[in-house]
């Protein structure tokens, strides 16, 4: 059975907007605020995604048309950039998995979900970035 594809519908109306990214940032900030209000410590990490530049070509997971593939790549980059910006603005412990961990078929099972090996590699990267037990 083929792997699922997580793609937007083939529709020209799907666009990344400044307003949409600002809503994403605001929602992310609200999540951080809620976690901190609970007394927990926040650790932030970007996500490995097939649409990011450091991922070996995995276009088959990004859509069936050049427009879908481009849109998914733009969405992945916009989300990753926003997570980086919010983490920096809050001066939070941060792991840039999207930049630091090579992305390929052995680590990513579809456009956004890690394989078993991917989970192991990301966990090791987190352990390298974060001093667990010191928070």
Image: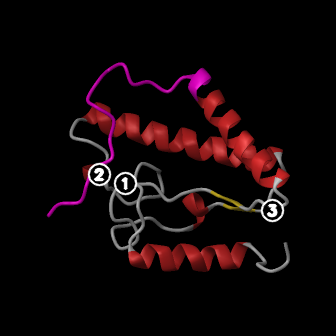
Magenta stretch bounds: 1-20
Residue at 45 percent of width and 73 percent of height? 118
Question: x, y percentage for residue 11?
Answer: 29, 24
Label 2 residue SS? helix
Label 1 residue SS? loop
Looking at the image, residue 8 lies above or below residue 126: above
Residue at 58 percent of width and 47 percent of height? 80
Instruction: Find out whether residue 36 is within the magenta segment.
Output: no
Q: Earlier in the sequence, mark 2 or mark 3?
A: 3
Question: x, y percentage for residue 9?
Answer: 28, 31
Q: Earlier in the sequence, mark 3 or mark 1?
A: 3
Q: CA distance from mark 3 to mark 1?
A: 30 Å
Q: CA distance from mark 2 to mark 1?
A: 5 Å
Q: Earlier in the sequence, mark 2 or mark 1?
A: 2
Label 1 neighbourhood size at 10 Å, few (<14), some (14-19), many (20+)? Answer: many
Please name the residue that numbered disc 2 is placed on. 61
Residue at 42 percent of width and 56 percent of height? 112
Instruction: Find out whether residue 8 is within the magenta segment.
Output: yes
Query: Residue 111 got which mark?
Result: 1
Looking at the image, residue 95 lies above or below residue 8: below
Label 2 neighbourhood size at 10 Å, few (<14), some (14-19), many (20+)? Answer: many
């Amino acid at each position: 059975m083929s792997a699922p594809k997580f793609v937007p519908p083939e529709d020209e109306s799907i666009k990344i907007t400044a307003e949409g990214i600002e809503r994403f940032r605001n929602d992310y900030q609200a999540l951080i605020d809620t976690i901190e209000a609970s007394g927990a410590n926040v650790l932030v990490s970007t996500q490995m995604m097939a649409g990011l530049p450091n991922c070996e070509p995995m276009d088959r997971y990004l859509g069936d048309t050049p427009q879908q593939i481009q849109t998914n790549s733009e969405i992945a980059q916009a989300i990753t950039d926003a997570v980086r910006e919010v983490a920096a603005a809050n001066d939070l412990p941060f792991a840039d998995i999207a930049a630091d961990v090579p992305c390929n078929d052995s680590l990513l099972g579809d456009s956004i979900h890690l394989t078993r090996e991917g989970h192991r590699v990301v966990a090791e990267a987190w352990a390298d970035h974060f001093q667990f037990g010191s928070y």
